[in-house]
Structure formats: structure tokens, C-alpha cells
Image (tube, rainbow, N blue to C red):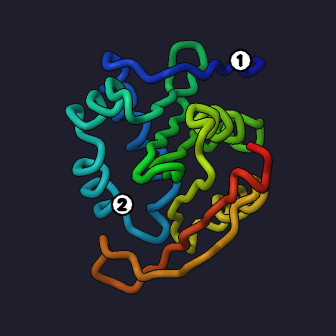
Amino acid sequence: MPIQVSIRPTMAEDAAKLKAALLCIWHETYDTFLGADRVTTLAAGWHTLEKLIAEAQSERTCSLVACDKGQIVGHALMYEPEPRTIHLARLYLDHDYHGKGIGKALLQQAIGAFPHAHKAYLEVYEPNRRAVEFYKGQGFEIVAKTRDAHTDDVLYEYRMEKDLARHGE
């Protein structure tokens, strides 16, 4: 059966489905190096219904969902923490949908919501090689490696940046 994914702005009524989708995707992505219990705990704190609703309703964020037959299979969240600089806080995609251009489309639409921005940045865990390579393929470069403040053990994440003016975005 062909995949027919649509990308649209997140609505407040998506919050419960989005929370469930993010939890599944986080387990797919992070269990191998964070552990399932820690992933469940982190996701519960970071993806509360109240927070997801507020992000969907905020004029300061670009929150997008990718849907396939009514099921949320991807999500992007972008905001502008300082003038002309945008932060990709989330870009997650169900692993069954990797390699189909959906992540790229989510990223491009999120960046496009801030046409005045000159720079985009994100953080990604070092062991998440697939994501690191994806972002490199989208023109992001590693500019720093730091120890993750959200874990007790030694885990590093990269800060990656993209000069949007140079890339004509």
C-alpha cells in the first residue's frame, strides 16, 4: 500500500496522538543508548499534553505533524529564540517512514516558516548517527560537542548549525 503522507500545522486536538507518537518514536530512537526506562521518564516530562497544546497554539513556534491515513507519523517543532536565529527543537519520524523524503519536507517547511532567519541550529545525540548524517545532508555542520545535561552518565550531543543566508533558504 503506497504511503500518502500529508504535512500540516499541529492543532491542539492533536496533542494526545502526538504525545503517543513521540513516545513510540523516542523508544525506537533512544532505547539503545538511553535505556527504555529513561526514555519513558524523559518523554513524560518533555511531552506533556499541556506543553504540546501550548506549542501548537503559539504564534512564536512552527509545530508541524506528518500524517498517514490520520495517524501521526512525524513531527517538527521550530522556534526563534533570538532574532534571525531559529532552533529546531524536534524533528522525529516513525522509523517505517525514514528515507522517503518526509523528514526533509518537515525540516524545509519548519525553516520556511521563518523566512527572515539567517541561521538554524539543533542538538542531536552523538550516538544517533542516522540523524547526524541526515542533518549533514541538509547542510548542517557540527559546531560543538557537549556533554548532555539531562543524563547522569557520559553522553554527548552535537550542536549543528546551518547558515540559511549562505544556503539561499
User: Mark 2 against mark 1, which lies toward the viewer?
Assistant: 1
Front residue of 57 and 119: 119
**Residue type at the position of mark 1:** Gln
Query: The N terminus appears in which quarter of the rendering?
Result: top right
> How far apart, in angstroms, are the residues tagged by discs 2 and 1?
31 Å
Q: Position of residue 64 (x, y in %)?
A: 51, 29
Q: Of label 2 and label 1, which has the lower sequence position?
A: 1
Residue 88 visible to the viewer: no
Q: Position of residue 40 (x, y in %)?
A: 30, 53
Q: Position of residue 14 (x, y in %)?
A: 37, 21
In this rendering, the answer to whether 64 lies above or below 132 is above
Determine the image quadrant of residue 109: top right
**For numbered disc 1, what is the local secondary structure?**
loop
**Residue type at the position of mark 2:** Ala
In this rendering, the answer to whether 143 lies above or below 50 is below
Front residue of 105 and 99: 105
| Left or right placement of residue 123 versus residue 108 in this view | left
Residue 126 visible to the viewer: yes
Q: What residue is drawn where x is 69% and y is 61%?
A: 140
Q: Position of residue 33 (x, y in %)?
A: 47, 71
Mark identifier at residue 36:
2
Query: Dot 2 surroundings within 10 Å: few (below 14), some, or many (20 or more)?
Result: some
Q: What residue is drawn where x is 78% and y is 56%?
A: 166
Query: Dot 1 surroundings within 10 Å: few (below 14), some, or many (20 or more)?
Result: few
Q: What residue is drawn where x is 77% and y is 36%?
A: 100
In this rendering, the answer to whether 79 lies above or below 55 is below
Residue bearing mark 1: 4
